[in-house]
Image: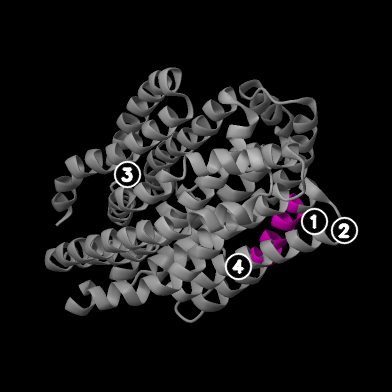
Amino acid sequence: MSDKSSIKYILGLSIPIFFANLAIPLVGIVDTALMGNLGNKSYLAATSVATSFFSMIFWSFGFLRMGTVGIVSQSYGKKDYKNILNLVFRNLLFVIIISLLLIIFKNQIFKLCLFFFDLSKETQKNFYDYFNVRIFSSIFELTIYIITGLFIGLQKTKISSLAIGSLSILNIIISSVLVLKYNLNVIGVAYGTLIAAGITSSIFLIYVFIFLKKYVSIKIDIEKIINFTKIKELIEINLNIFLRTILLTFSFFWFTYLGSKIGEEFIAANTILINLIFLSAFILDAYAFSTEGIIGYSIGLKNKKLFTNVVKNSFILSSFTGLVISIFYLFSKDIFINFMTDIESIKNISFQFSFWLILLPFLSSFCYQFDGIFIGASQTKELRDAMFISVTLYLLSSYFLVQNFGNQGLWISFTIFLILRALTLGFYFKRIYLKF
């Protein structure tokens, strides 16, 4: 058991997630670079708003991954593979329902987005072109959430990492071909995501059932899948994660919204910087993801010593890596910015605010690691409450700071938000011990 809590074991689980997670923000970086080097600010602004909006929509259903990890890892500790299989079927049913609702109400969702953003007519048109394609990738992207959650919960991080990495690499390749060879601009980026998600989810969903067949007979037992006790339990866990994730994604959406009020050039510049922040976030999330599975496993075994050692060692790894990324950005930030756009005005704004790239990776490492611990413990009420407090204070501070300090105030308020997330979860941490 001690091996499962060691720095070496956590690092072994995290390395494949690290490389896969590295590919996720690279999609955003490449998409931004593809649009940012076409000489048209409208392409970059439209892609910035659209990707921010879809992140808000899809991340809102992040419970399909996070809720899956907690239940699967605890079931794995009990060797209850039937429960794991039925959970997969139950979540796939949720995905079908959610995706159909998004597609049916896509026009209303699009109008709602335009209500928040003051965009030029050209940018609105480009945004609509992207939106009308990307919305159909919902069933594929949400299915991938289930697949990654399942294998992280089973501590098979190489498989979940392969799924994430395949999606991201395919996305980059297909988008680049459609934009650079076929001149499809914004639509090319949207189709790149749709096609990549469709291929990846289909291949890995087939693999899920091949893998589970080793441990349990693959049967669709409607009575057990639509088990109202299990559904109620799942809804209680997932509803809290859903509300927490809605608040989190809204905070990023709010960041883009306030940037749009300052000006379209600031949306574009902030997008370049926030994509690099996401790059560091996904790297640090590797430790959170790997910790989720071990945390749930330790609770399933009722092993408090294993739990305590995992928490301590995962924080050591996460904070040290955050510091390394901050130092890396100190020397490389200008190279990234020059790669992502050739528009001088946007480059100058990006350089002006690039200080935040150095500060945030280390500061944010603590809140990401706390997220992994609480998700693995299925302590979702506390996740929800902590996020509510953090977002409320973030919204209030951002409104005041942007009014007085413009874009600098926006970045200050975002930093406050990340610190608050760590402080509030730290306050609730002792409640997890009640599970032992």
Residue 297 found in image quarter: bottom left
Foreground residue among 286 and 401:
401
Q: Residues within 10 Å of mark 1 (few under 14, many from 20)?
A: many
**Who comes first in sequence, dot 3 or dot 2?**
2
Q: Position of residue 140 (x, y in %)?
A: 65, 56
- SS of the residue at dot 1? helix
Distance between the Cα atoms at labels 4 and 2?
31 Å
Q: What residue lies at 32% left-to-right and 26% top-to-bottom?
A: 393
Q: Position of residue 65 (x, y in %)?
A: 46, 55
Q: Which residue is mark 3?
A: 380
Residue 75 found in image quarter: bottom left
Q: Which residue is mark 4?
A: 205
* Residue 392 appears left or right of 201: left
Q: Position of residue 286 (x, y in %)?
A: 39, 63
Residue 182 image label: 2
Callouts 4 and 2 close, C-beta under 8 Å: no
- SS of the residue at dot 3? helix
Distance between the Cα atoms at labels 3 and 1?
41 Å
Distance between the Cα atoms at labels 1 and 4?
29 Å
Q: Which residue is mark 1?
A: 179
Q: Residues within 10 Å of mark 3 (few under 14, many from 20)?
A: many
Front disc: 1 or 4: 1
Magenta residue span: 189-201
